[in-house]
Amino acid sequence: MPDYSGESFGSIEDLMSYLSAIESTVEGEVSKIADSIDAVTDRISASLRSAIGESTWFPDLKPPPPAPAPIIARPMGYLEASRDWVSRHRAVTAAVVCFIGTGAYMIWRQRRANRAKRRARRAKNGQRTEVVVLAGPPSAPLTRSLSLDLERRGFVVYIPVNSLWEERLIQAESKADIHPLHLDITSSSSVTSTIRKFTAVLDPPNAPRYPLRLASLILLPQTPAPPQIASITDLSADSWSDAFSTHVLSPFTLLQAFLPLLQSHKASILFLTPTNTTSLSPPLHGLENMVAGGMNNYISTLRKELASSEGTKVVQLKLGAFDDGSDRDAMKMVVALRHDARTYSEAISPPVTEQSRVRGSPLRELHLEVFDAIVGKRKGVVYVGRGSRIYAYLGKVMPEGLVGWMLGLQKKREQAKEKEKEDEKVPSARGSPGWEPVEPMSSEESA
């Protein structure tokens, strides 16, 4: 800015130029001062920000985030709800699907197998060529049911008998293809003669165009019926001997007589054994357990010995509970023929008149399994009937003490009920209101 001190302004233009110079000088100084103030302010604010950011005691002045907007849930339908539940419980869904699928497949397979027709092979002219020997008591309901079913499916059935009464019982069925086979297993000569005649029936000298073939031997060894519930110490030697001879030795002797013929015809051997009671080996059932143990061991040994024999298979059907219902026709025949057999009540068990509390499987299941075993579709051990498999499993797993405790507790309950019934019938001695007998007084006492 020009220096005008000590000079006078000669004109107005000089004055104006002087003032403008002063204004520009003031503006420059003011801007310098403002710049200095801004620089100092910036340094102070930076120091404060650094101190506040590094300090831990100073509270956080950051404002909280805003609250989320409320979500309005739309009601889901059944399909969407099911899909959501499945997505949240995948393991449970997979287990349920596997269980239902397996059960449905088994039911479908069983129904398909039951619907399949089971008929014995016949000749081209319709003649029956398959023969089955059903070794069981002719008066037993199971023997009668199996014989009628096998005859209906196209088999020629022979039932061994050892008395005229049993022969008449079979002839009363009026079936042309159910025949009695006289066989006295107590006489070796009678057994040999019977087997020779039976072989001649199967293979006659003048061989026909369609010869008969022995398809199977079915053995129905039964436990003592009615079961003799007694401790081992109360059973006599005669009881053990009779049970062993009737229910163990007789089937063995019969099988030994038929075994060469079975091997020559490549026939199957079927054992039908009850398993519900004997699987648990309960106390006070010594005769039943002895018979069942002997039969199981014998069948196992026979199966191993005949393993090398081609065509001859040993199948054991372990029977559970069956619902055979009432057999009125059989009962009528038994009543009509009772006068011909005085020892009938000692030879067979009395008929069951009370309906069992536990409903069993239908006999159709047993018929189908027997047919499948005859034709070779079953081998080894087959469980059929309600409770057969579960009782066999419990007999292997359940401790012996637990079985005895359960059966003993049941027996005590029955004894207590019987005692209560007797107490109700017989009045007690203490509170008996009955009259006491009074003896007549003598003449001296009356005086």
Image (cartoon, rainbow, N blue to C red):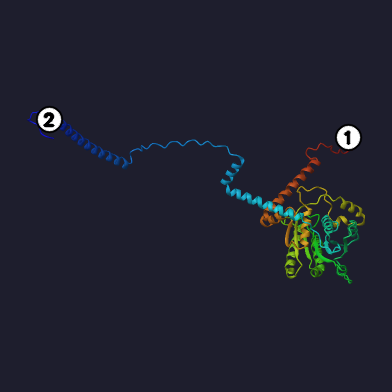
- Element at badge 1? helix
Q: Where does label 2 land, which residue? A: 14
What residue is shown at x 82% (from left), y 67% (from top)?
258
State the separation of the CA atoms marked 2 and 1.
186 Å
Residue 232 appears in view: no
Picture quarter containing residue 178?
bottom right
Considering every residue shown, the one lying at the far bottom of the view is: 205
| SS state under label 2 | helix
Within 10 angstroms of label 1, few (less than 14), some, or many (20 or more) residues? few
Residue 119 placed where, x, y %? 81, 59
CB under 8 Å between discs 2 and 1: no
Query: Hey, which quadrant is residue 345 in on the image?
Result: bottom right
Query: Closest to the observer: 342 or 397?
Result: 397
Name the front one of labels 2 and 1.
2
The quadrant of the image that shows the N terminus is top left
Residue 388 on image: x %, y %: 73, 55
In terms of depth relative to the viewer, which is nearer, 107 or 277? 107
Amino acid on which the number 1 mark rests in the picture:
Ser
Which residue, given by chain and number where applicable, does mark 1 sit on?
Answer: 446
Mark drawn on residue 191: none
* Residue displayed at 92% across by 53% down: 336
Task: Please provide percent x and percent y for residue 158.
Answer: 85, 62
Three-letter code, disc 2: Asp
